[in-house]
Image (cartoon, rainbow, N blue to C red):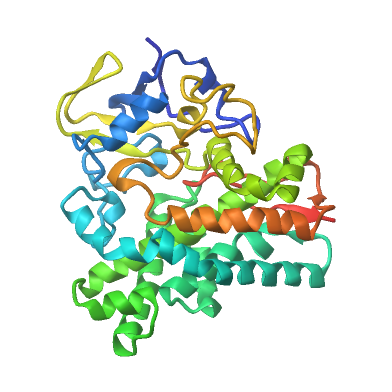
Amino acid sequence: MDILQALPLERDDPFEPPAVLGELHGPLHRMIYADGRPGWLVTGHAEARVVLDDPRFSNTSQGAAPPIKELAPPEGLTDLVIPPGFFIAMDDPEHSRYRRLLTGHFSMRRMRLLEPRIQEIIDGLLDEIARAGAPADLVSAFALPVPSLVICELLGVPYEERSRFQATTARAVNLDSPVEERGAAGAELMGYLSELVARKRAAPGQDLISQLATGGELSHEELTGVATLLLTAGHETTANMLALGTFLLLCRPEQAELVRTDPGVAATAVEELMRYLSITHIGPIRVARADVPLAGRTIRAGETVTLSLPAVNRDPARFPDPGRFDVAREAGPQLGFGHGIHQCLGQQLARLEMRLAYPALLRRFPGLRLAVPAAEVPLRPRATIYGVAALPVTW
């Protein structure tokens, strides 16, 4: 049985999983974690669904071994501290209490109501890019502003204050920075949201934070944590998908042409881009609360399990010809948004933003192409969410 000495992260090709993952045999592998403890790496799609769906695997991170040293707690602590309201790192019943308050705000019905406004935001940004002229950095001009503007409007965060959260979030997820600096960035971000929550309590509006603030079910600290989580997740992940997905499409012009010309392809293209790129490349991470049989092995209580989504979403047992990128593929559920009770709360919003943004961008600029050689596009391999730092384009 293969024993991995570290979680594979480095990609030789910006669009391909780390090469060592393709050399593994079977869906479950022993892995030595950064603190020396043995644990497991899941690379099979069916096995990943089991882990994400089984309540015997805890999502709290308490007792979890760090898959990479950068995720280890600061010196002197044995576990990372989970702030109030960070339900993404909680198990039931606490997790369900928070999620119940939020689910209706991210329903399919709510997303349909938001669609015209999201399209308006996208078209407005494309107008600005056209006015400014070529070349452009699609990260700063499009990929980051689209989800940032949308989540700001939804939450009630003033977009003109974006400099207070965009740069801070980038520092918080940059694994090249010391854990203390990332912690300080996270604290700074929560400080900003704490101020905003206080403003909403004093003068509520029609936005989500105001509704939660006046609902009376969350303390100030809890609402601050919820707001921080939603703001961070609401712009960081989708921004990276928009940028990296556009990079891939520009390198596969025949696929870009399908997205540009066939309205029926947009929805499948989003799923295929999520599957093929798997920007969540460090986890999810779980800790077994009991002995659990999986793939013919036994995961012991207390052991850490990490899912490798780049491998899971290329599992040939689930996706025929998984190394082929096909925006018209309808081969089944990718796990980029998770599975089970912890699947991404905002996944329908993210899907909608991408479904509208990719075709609009490619139709508005049919001659869109990279302004630098593909090898010179700067990547983010050491961030918690994989992507590109900039995407220079021309047309």
At 64% from the left and 51% from the top, the residue drawn is: 243
In the image shown, does 50 or 240 lie closer to the viewer?
50
Could you say which quadrant of the image residue 104 lies in? bottom left
In the image shown, does 373 or 319 lie closer to the viewer?
319
In the image shown, does 63 or 72 lie closer to the viewer?
63
x and y percentages locating residue 32 in the rendered image: 35, 24
Could you say which quadrant of the image residue 375 lies in? top right
Residue 217 in sight from this viewpoint: yes
Query: The C terminus appears in which quarter of the rendering?
Result: bottom right
Above or below: residue 110 compared with residue 334: below
Could you say which quadrant of the image residue 172 lies in? bottom left
Query: The N terminus appears in which quarter of the rendering?
Result: top left
x and y percentages locating residue 369 in the rendered image: 81, 49
x and y percentages locating residue 313 in the rendered image: 49, 31
Above or below: residue 137 compared with residue 192: above
User: Across the whole image, how many numbered discs are drawn on residues?
Assistant: 0
Horizontal side of residue 208 vs 363, given as left or right = left
Q: Residue furthest bottom?
A: 203
Residue 165 in sight from this viewpoint: no
At 63% from the left and 35% from the top, the residue drawn is: 15
Horizontal side of residue 337 vs 342, given as left or right = right
At 31% from the left and 27% from the top, the residue drawn is: 36
In the image shown, does 117 or 252 lie closer to the viewer?
117
Above or below: residue 130 compared with residue 25: below
x and y percentages locating residue 340 in the rendered image: 30, 41
At 20% from the left and 73% from the top, the residue drawn is: 219
Q: Residue furthest top?
A: 1
Above or below: residue 242 compared with residue 47: below
